[in-house]
Image (cartoon, rainbow, N blue to C red):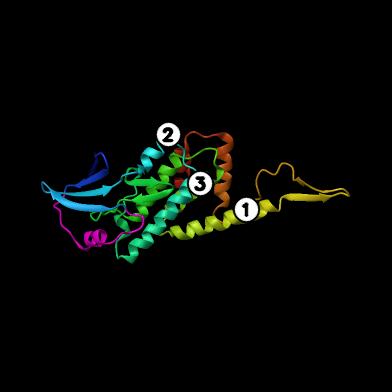
Amino acid sequence: MNMEYEKELNKVCLHINIPKFYEEDYQMSMLRENEIAGLLAISGCGIEGESRYTYGITGLVSMEALFENKAIGEKDIREFVTCLLNTIRELRKFMLNPGGLLLEPQYIFIRKQEYFFCYLPDNSSELCKSFHQITEYFVKKLDYKDEKGITLAYELHKSTLQDNYDLEMIMEEYQKEKEAEEEELEDTFVFTLNDEESVYTPVKDVTMVKESGGVWGAWKKAANRIKREKLSKLEEFILETNRQEE
């Protein structure tokens, strides 16, 4: 599989070429006749015994280009996962296999915090493995100053090592933990009253709320350790956790 761009004055296209004779099935008919949220518009044809799939990407930027010189934060990861889950739901409505999504950064495009995906009918990779691979990309591109981003990226990476995982459940657990922390933070202020006016004094040295249980506890500690020590080789930490998992 190889890719190439075609640029004209008023449009930009991405071509993906597959060394396989082009044959249409119900997938291409479904993609052509329906506008599916989260997918790039696609067309297909045969060229010199190969299959070519063309996607319209005018006005979009690839994830690879966007984060080439920019760190990935917690907000970026959440937005990506939300768009991916929404797209998977849409695919199932049209009886399309979510495994057709290409989850490499060069095939994912963004416009105003909204992600768009290439759907490749001939794609034979497993979606669960593809998502785990992109969590490795998140870890490598992390913002070291974003404690929540570190926590989320590493939990996604560790959880998706399992053969059968539920991405929606992982994100729901993360959201519950996040909301619980926000509620605890609201309770970290001590209010004192005097005769003239009401004033409040924040509790001193409160830099983080107490850690709760569950799967997120260990990763919060890891995020703090990475932030304190300013580790530059996050891949070593991945290998360490992988060995523990094995």
Question: In the rendered image, which residue does mark 2 sit on?
Answer: 69
Can the viewer see residue 46? yes
Going from N to C along the chain, the mark reached first, 3 or 1, is: 3
Residue plotted at (15% across, 57% down): 23
Residues 40 and 74: in front is: 40
Q: Please check the rendered image and state whether residue 135 is part of the magenta-colored stretch, yes or no.
A: no
The kind of secondary structure element at disc 1 is helix
Write the start and end of the magenta stretch as one range: 20-39
Distance of label 2 from label 3 (alpha carbons): 17 Å
Q: Residue 228: image x %, image y %?
A: 59, 36
Residue plotted at (36% across, 62% down): 90
* Amino acid bearing label 1: Glu
* Amino acid bearing label 3: Glu
* Amino acid bearing label 2: Asn
Residues 13 and 136: in front is: 13
Question: In the rendered image, which residue does mark 3 sit on?
Answer: 74
